[in-house]
Amino acid sequence: MLALLRILLMAFCGLYLAPLVGQGGGASIATVSKTSERDTIVLSDSVQVVGIYLNGQKRTRQRVIFREMGLKRGARIPSTEIRERVDRSYATLMNTGLFASVDIAIDTLNADEIALELQIRETWYLYPVPVFSLADRNFNVWLNEMNASLDRVNIGAKLTYYNFTGRRDRLKIGYETGYRRLYELSYRHPYINQAGSLGLEASYRYRQQREQNYLTVGNRQEFVRLEDRFIYEQQSVDVKLTYRRRLYVSHSLTAGYQSSEIADTIATILNPEFFGGGRSSQEFASLRYSFTDDRRDVRNYPWRGYFLRATLDKDGLGITGERDGLTAGLTYSKFIPLNEKYSINVGAGAKYSFIRSQQPFLENRAIGFGSNGIVGYQFYVVDGLDMLIWRAGIRRELFRTKVNLGKWVFIDAFRQIPIRVLFAVQANQGFANAPFAGEANRLNNTLLTGVSAGFDAVLYYDMVGSVQYNRNHLGEDGVFLALQLSF
């Protein structure tokens, strides 16, 4: 119900991150000939793009648009690839999140030359968004295990200014209170050099919690709460440098510092291995390298393309001596359209710890955290040094439509709500290697299998809601809800 109210609020107020790209379809493209209707231009084997003309953008710098298009003035391309290349440029432009719509017209000037004309409608960039978030890993845990307790809710406000200076940069300021207290500040600039290949981001976070997960028992999280003071505090600073010479491929290097403190109740009694050695505090510096190759048409609900990310994390650089971890991660997803109505997807996720000694409790997470979930196991978590997950599924689009809110919404970019409804079937398997788990967690070191069938609803192109029937290898089943928003 809360999720539904939030959707209605965003639709009414227009406080929503812009649509990214149309699902399963191409750009809005028109082909225009500069000759009379009686003349027919037969294109050469290849043509040259002699001009790209922009109309409608007000804030976004022209060089940002040209950088993201992938097609440049002077480029020569095979005639048979014109439509495909324009489709690809449309997808990359919309995936920036800067535009509500982009219409591309192809002007055929003669047999050897074409020009492109873009009609652009920018989205709204300043979002003062009220925050209502759950402290638990997913909606189903909060509803069923925590009885929808409002004590496990975070409320606050987040101000996000996209395209802050017209260069696709982002400024974010946030404050939350309730289950936790959170302060955050970040600034991201993706083009710090003239070529647009280098980007820089700096962020600061400080959070305090009265309740903390301190142990995993029966593959479920155990919590302890202090009413009179905060039981867990953490602050972190990160600086990330990104290199993106090619449009879809990027490299990033992040240097960070993290300092954490817990109550003595956890460190000395409940779980001395929370930080290790019965310590009540921990601080360390870290380095993270990430390689990303992202060729999805729509990032939150892809229909075609693939996504690859490989990471290497070094926690503890020998400065404080309180942390020593070296972990590699891999995520891969492939999306293959069979036709306009059907698309199949396959994927895998992996984690490997090069340092085989027991790691601190919060750094020993595997299945059930972040994107490393398996259908049917929403109520479980599996800790471990190593992890492997593989997935496969098929989706069938049932229908798509647009709802025009008209004068109910005062911002033009949000008056039309594109809606798609699909039927989806998924099968997941995974395994977490946990040599220090003990006998209290039966799902560790066990092959997990889950299947699901249900309906997905996609609003505003990248807001995804799901209703699924899931079943796992334990014979447990049920109906689960999921909601993915882009804030």
Image (spheres, rainbow, N blue to C red):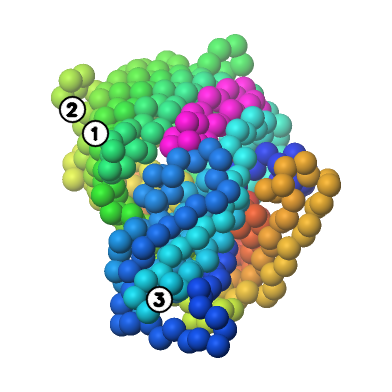
Q: Residues within 10 Å of mark 2 (few under 14, many from 20)?
A: some
For the magenta stretch, what is the residue range? Answer: 152-177
Q: CA distance from mark 3 to mark 1?
A: 54 Å
In the rendered image, the vertical position of residue 334 relative to residue 98, given as above or below: below
Q: Residue at x 33, y 82 (%)?
A: 44
- What residue would you read off at disc 1? 287
The label on residue 110 is: 3
User: Is residue 304 covered in magenta?
Assistant: no
Amino acid residing under circle 2: Leu
Q: CA distance from mark 2 to mark 3?
A: 61 Å
Asked if residue 483 lies left or right of residue 213, the reply is right
- What residue would you read off at disc 2? 317
In the rendered image, the vertical position of residue 423 relative to residue 210, given as above or below: below
Tell me the element at label 3.
Answer: strand
Q: Mark 2 against mark 3, which lies toward the viewer? A: 3
Sequence-wise, the earlier of marks 2 and 3 is 3
Q: CA distance from mark 1 to mark 2?
A: 8 Å
Q: Residue at x 60, y 33 (%)?
A: 126
